[in-house]
Image (cartoon, helix red, strand yellow):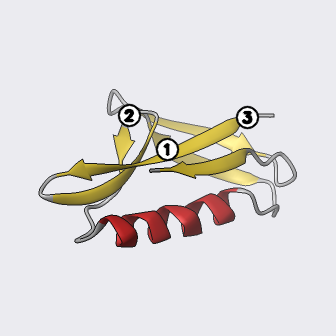
Amino acid sequence: MTKVIYEIVQHDGGWAYRSNGVYSETFPTQDAARRAAGRVAKEQQLGGETESISYEDRDGQWHSEVARGDDRPEAEVRG
């Protein structure tokens, strides 16, 4: 099973969560970033429909693939 880790870090004058070198939007407080990462982590683990997804990697490259609705990673928030 894949594991996704969201790290809470200082970023761009505030706080953000980061996964695989990619940052979220900036939040005014560490707690706000942690809550947002927690929501994302919970959503990441929800099953659903098989569908096409797009995502950006740490090098700024966009990828498209089919994500099976029953193949969900484990997600964790650190920081």
Q: Secondary structure at mark 3?
A: loop
Where is residue 76? Give x, y as percent.
62, 49
Where is residue 56? Give x, y as percent.
42, 40
Separation of disc 1 and disc 2 at Cα? 13 Å
Which is nearer the N-term, disc 3 or disc 2?
Answer: 3
Q: Is residue 61 left or right of residue 20?
A: left
Mark 2: give few (<14), some (14-19) or many (20+) Cα within 10 Å: few
Q: Which residue is mark 1?
A: 55
> What residue lies at 71% left-to-right and 43% top-to-bottom?
66
For the residue marked with disc 2, what is the amino acid? Gly
> What residue lies at 77% left-to-right and 63% top-to-bottom?
46
Quarter residue 44 falls in: bottom right
Quarter residue 25 falls in: bottom left
- Position of 43 relative to 10 (above/below): below
Separation of disc 1 and disc 3 at Cα? 16 Å
Which is nearer the N-term, disc 1 or disc 2?
Answer: 2
Q: Which residue is mark 2?
A: 21
- Exactly how many numbered labels are in the figure? 3
Q: Which residue is mark 3?
A: 2
Q: Quadrant of the N terminus?
A: top right
Q: Is residue 77 left or right of residue 42?
A: left
